[in-house]
Image (spheres, coloured by chain):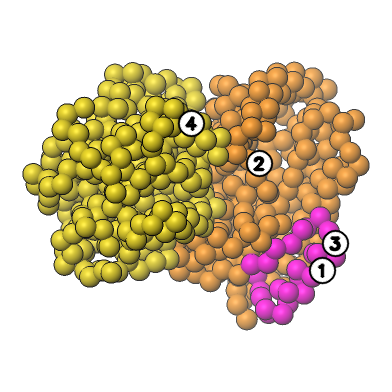
Chain colours: A orange, B yellow
Amino acid sequence: MRSTVLITGATGGLGKALAAECAARGWDLFLTDVSEQALAPLVAGLERQFGVTVLYRAANLTDPQARTELWQAIDRLGLRFHFLCNVAGIDFEGPFVERTLDDLHTILRLNIESTVETTRHALSRRDRTRPLHILNVASLAAFYPMPLKAVYASSKRFLLDWSLALNRELREADATVTALCPAGMPSTPLVISLIDAQGLPGRLTTMNTGEVAARAIEDALRGRAICIPGLINQVLRVAGGMVPPQILAALIERRWRQSQKQAAPVLAARQHSPDLAPSTR
Amino acid sequence: MENVTDLTGKTIVVTGATAGIGQAALTALAARGATVIGVGRSEARCEAARRVLLSAYPQAQITYLVADLASQRQVRLLATAIRERLHAAGADHLDVLVNNAGTVSSWYVATEDGYEMQFAVNHLAAFLLTGELLPLLGRAEAGRVLTVSSGSHFRTRIHWQDVMFRRGYGILKAYTQSKLANVLFSAEFNRRMVGLARIRAYAVDPGLVNTQIGLKGTSGLEHWFWGRRAAGGVSPEQAAQTIIHLASAPTLEDPDAVYWNACRPCRPSRIAQRPAEAARLWALSERLCGIIMPEGQLA
């Protein structure tokens, strides 16, 4: 039996940073994400950098069949887990009516269905000799009704409430559940240019991905129910709680429409520039 | 330009050659008859730079290869493409490798290998590409590995406890450390290749140059800062003079000096001169690149 950390969505910006943070603590890892091509170099780099064992398997977690095969592969390896990072998640930004049914299903399946299922699987394969820590990547969006990101933000709200409830439930079983609620992170050139497009608000709410990962792992080890990296983001959360939700939704809609206008040239430029290829997370 | 040397028959690779110092150096070297290979990240910018060069020097022997040096897989593919290109041109060796490509990022970004972007591009890519091309360089009459460093390496050190700055990332901390790494790499290279007098590494301090570096990966205050900083600098053509001198002078006034500014040998920082620091960085770089650099005798 090998005691391992399971990380989904491992090749995205936050996934890479969490993987490095865990490997730096000497923990062996099992990584998954959609792209084999993205997993292979990351795994090699982590092993070289930290001297830990890193196993991986590519899987499209929106597909129930692929999830089943992933867990069969994990069982063949006989892995046991002491830490789970549910990072895999997706958003298609824009008006609800412009989203296809496929887009909507993908968000619900990956952000909610797969996260819940993965957690259930990991719980029954936990390393019983030590505490189990579960880190669910929600979002600052989980605290607000968000026009133009309606399904995404609601899926993150689900993760937040579910994590809070599960954290209580599992207390007896020596397991903790932490909901990580970060603001946007500058993890890829595309996201960086989108954050830049937001101007000062984007800059103020943004934190380095490495810093977010470090804080998240520390808070998960302490069993904190919610981790909100960044003082300004904590203030935003408290302030948001004092405004009636209908008003909040209107304010957020105005802000997103504004930043969409600012981001339009960035997104148009992406089509012409290979630097700005979107991440595969 | 003073003391123009004919470089016909020489083969030279310059990374980051679609803008700034790299483009200026590539142009000057091609103008002197060298067979040059430029490396850029974007196909479109490579093609544009190639056209500009050929319109000024229709006879230039020039190829551009596309590679994103943030990816070690792409650095290896680039080395293969360079070998093939030289082979096709009938050259069995590489005379000069100019590791010029550099980047700046205002945020912590991990590459596909999970390494911090500035450390990966500014240092590890140069280390790996040099290692991959070493056999070709060793066959040259006087192989030279030039790595563009910076005077900003003076007030920093290697942050061994967290070389990738996963915590406490700062744009200048990561940049200056990578530029110090360039000097340490060049110095250690010469110590390791001591049995081989024909091949030498030099770190080039281009001075303050008016290029786009610092403007591509930043915004707001940092963008303004790098812009202001560049405005006081010399032209890329002037800055490329040291590269051209080190690449083309048949003999150097002080071939053992590792750090060069304005075509003259200078003393790098105290830390840059410490063999223990350099050896430690060398071992780390070998591990992170998954290679073992041959020592002493080559070819």
Task: Report, in whole angstroms, how far the alpha carbon at label 3 lies from the one at label 2.
Answer: 25 Å
Residue identifier under label 2 = A278
Label 2 or label 4, whichever lies nearer to me, is 4
Residue B295 image point, x, y percent:
25, 69
Labels 2 and 4 share a subunit = no
SS category of the residue bearing label 4: helix
Residue B83 image point, x, y percent:
42, 58
Residue at image coords 31%, 43%: B34
The quarter holding residue A129 reads bottom right
Labels 4 and 3 share a subunit = no
SS category of the residue bearing label 2: loop
Q: Say which amino acid is labelled 3.
A: Pro
State which region is magenta. Answer: A56-84
**Label 3: chain letter:** A
Task: Report, in whole angstroms, how far the alpha carbon at label 1 lies from the one at label 4.
Answer: 53 Å
Residue identifier under label 4 = B51
**Label 4: chain letter:** B
Crowdedness of circle 4 by 10 Å Cα count: few (<14), some, many (20+)? few
Task: Report, in whole angstroms, how far the alpha carbon at label 4 lies from the one at label 3.
Answer: 51 Å
Q: Say which amino acid is labelled 2.
A: Pro
Residue identifier under label 3 = A64
Name the residue nearer the viewer: A83 or A262: A262
Residue identifier under label 1 = A68
Task: Report, in whole angstroms, how far the alpha carbon at label 3 lies from the one at label 1.
Answer: 6 Å
Residue A80 included in the magenta stretch of the image: yes
